[in-house]
Amino acid sequence: MLLFVEAKTQNIHHWETAVFDNDIWKYFVGTSEPDTNWRKVSFNDGSWQQGVGGVGYGDGDDNTIISNTLSLYTRRIFTVTDTSKIELAVLNMDYDDGFVAYLNDVEIGRANIGSFGDHPLFNQGSSGLHEAQMYQAGSPEQYIINTQLLKSILIQGNNVLTIQVHNDNISSSDLTSRAFLSFGLNDASSQFSANPTWFQPPLVFTSSNLPIVSINTNSQTINDNVRIVADMGIIYNGPGNRNYMVDPFNEYNGKISIELRGSSSQSFPKKSYSLETQDSLGNNNNVAIMDMPKENDWVLYAPYSDKTLIRNVLTYRLGEKLGGYAPRTKLCELVLNGDYKGVYVFTEKIKKDNDRVDIATLDSTDLSGDDLTGGYIVKIDKTTNGPGIDWSSPIPPPNTTAQQINYQFHYPKQDEILPVQGTYIENYITSFENALDGPNFTDTTLGYRPYIDELSFIDFFIMNELSRNVDGFRLSTFLYKDKDSKGGEITMGPLWDFNLSFGNANYCDGGLSTGWSSDFNYVCPGDGFSVPFWWDRLKQDTTYTNQLRCRWENLRLKELHQDTILSFIDTLASYLSESQQRNFQRWPILTSYVWPNNFIGNTYANEITYLKNWVTNRISWIDNNIPGNCYNVGIEENFATLSFNVFPNPASDYIYLNLNGKSGIEKQIHIINSIGSVVYQSQTNAKRHSVNVSGLARGIYIVEVVEDNLRMYKKIIIN
């Protein structure tokens, strides 16, 4: 049973603060284990040092400076004159890198170290890095102590707040412990002091026009890379209906496993999570959630530095309109262990699935022939959540030899893919890169075309350039390959992680509405991540740039029309008009810089206006600068509708072609050998065509299909 904050805050008359960060604190530097009684009021701390808080070093945010240490223990005694007047308590904690807090020897808050109930050893490092927030104009994290727990531990008279802070490592340049303890009183009486100016009482949250997601970790801490089992309930009464906290869990009510997700975003107080829906035995439980198809892997994304709250939602929806798969999303509000956490985006995780990345399953028995050729999902990304890179491109990014493009297996997972499978997809992508980098890269048989789905590359380019995504192309970049019998080309996507796009970054020229983000090799080489040479090379092919321009100009007539995009932004902003107010009450950052904001508005409306103006300027710049020539604007792109599959592949007697394209239009079919000679040709209006290849020598061939002077290619193997 979750304890919801709103039920307790209704009885609160006002808030006061009993413990401040700059009070006089007793402290013990963790060179050894402290006395086991150090968390109790009765403990004699006479031998401990004392000083004005905060206590720590580095960053200039501490009043009492100590030497480098892996742990620090602090105590502050305060007096309660009447416990009956107190309804609720809040610990606000600013720390670097992990901590556990206790009130009268009972744990009331923890982050980034251990699990609930354990007492980390003095020489134990935190489970990850966490940067203090107050010295950089942020707010401390809030931990609510519910009434039931508070009544059981609070004492009439002296009480003690004790905190142990742990560093990531002994050589770390900073450590911080700054704590505040505040109480909600049920009448006009006063026992303590006025609150800090930044203090925000726990939010009264009773209902929403958004779905409500409630998670109870049963006093466990959500960690990074180590999942815990928790309970999740979702209240969703359908589109247009209001959702109330007192409603039953009607969309989901069961177990999940959950962990933190993200890289740099983990430093934000508003956390993102990865979760799996499970049955009571801990098995994966595929469920349809909030109008999204059945699956068990999900992401609860926390928009924080994106103060519009919608950049990912906007991008994925536009990407879906372009015709490919993009993650489905559902805006919601999250309550975690009774604490309101604000607006979140419930998102499909990128995964091989019939309703997500729809490619063949690659089993442990798929070790040769067509079985080996798919499906694979590969990514270019940071290695934050994985064991490391799997291979590096042999071709460096343009204008640099000091950096490499590194690839990681996403499906099958790095610990599941077999060596022969890993070697196959590495060799295939490397062959594509060598063909693209080679002197004959525009050649229809010797160049790059037989390896890739050109439309997916063009659409991926358009979406990353439309948004001028600073991470585009070089991070959070996915590509996949199905079996040769199902197409077998490298396909770009799905789109992922656009929170720093649309003018929301003050580095890598991310705030500019001009210039190409695919040229980051020239303007942003310093962070170690570069754009693959592909995009620069592809723009040297006039056939490709002509297709690119045609695709852009035709999309601008409808899917990417300026009015279409701006109207969708307005629709999302209107949908969030109520919930965004609660979100920014919980996280009061609207007027503050949050890394890496390029713009800081005074209101949510300012943030939306900035986004719309930026989009308007960006579209105008691309209109005037996109390369290529197009002569069929207003006509559906032929290369987007012309497609075919060839199977079996490899083949020894017959191959069969399934042909799509304009109905009634004759298609020419050519088979071309490795030296560019046409060894077979025919014409057909049919949707299916067979070719006897038993007379061809063993080797690699290209199948070319031509319709209205537009061409598509597939590589086949004859054995």
Image (spheres, rainbow, N blue to C red):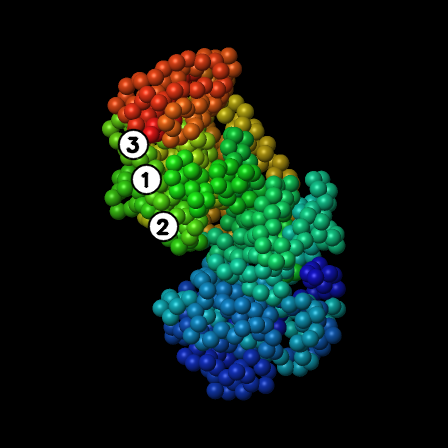
Disc 3 versus disc 1: distance between alpha carbons?
12 Å
**Residue 400 in the figure: left or right of residue 588:** left
Q: Position of residue 695 (x, y in %)?
A: 32, 21
* Residue 500 rendering spot, x and y as whole percentages: 47, 44
| Residue beneath disc 1 | 427
Using the image as rendered, state which of residue 153 and residue 607 is in the foreground: 153
Kind of residue at badge 3: Ala
Q: Is residue 343 visible?
A: no
Residue at disc 1, secondary structure: helix
Sequence-first tag of 1 and 2:
2
The residue that mark 2 highlights is: 389
Name the residue type under label 1: Asn
Image quadrant in which you'd find residue 717: top left
Q: Position of residue 671 (x, y in %)?
A: 35, 20
Please name whichever residue, 605 or 684, is drawn nearer the observer in this view of the structure. 684
State the residue position of label 3: 435
Residue 154 is left or right of residue 173, and the answer is right
Q: Earlier in the sequence, mark 3 or mark 1?
A: 1
Against 32, residue 357 (above or below) is above
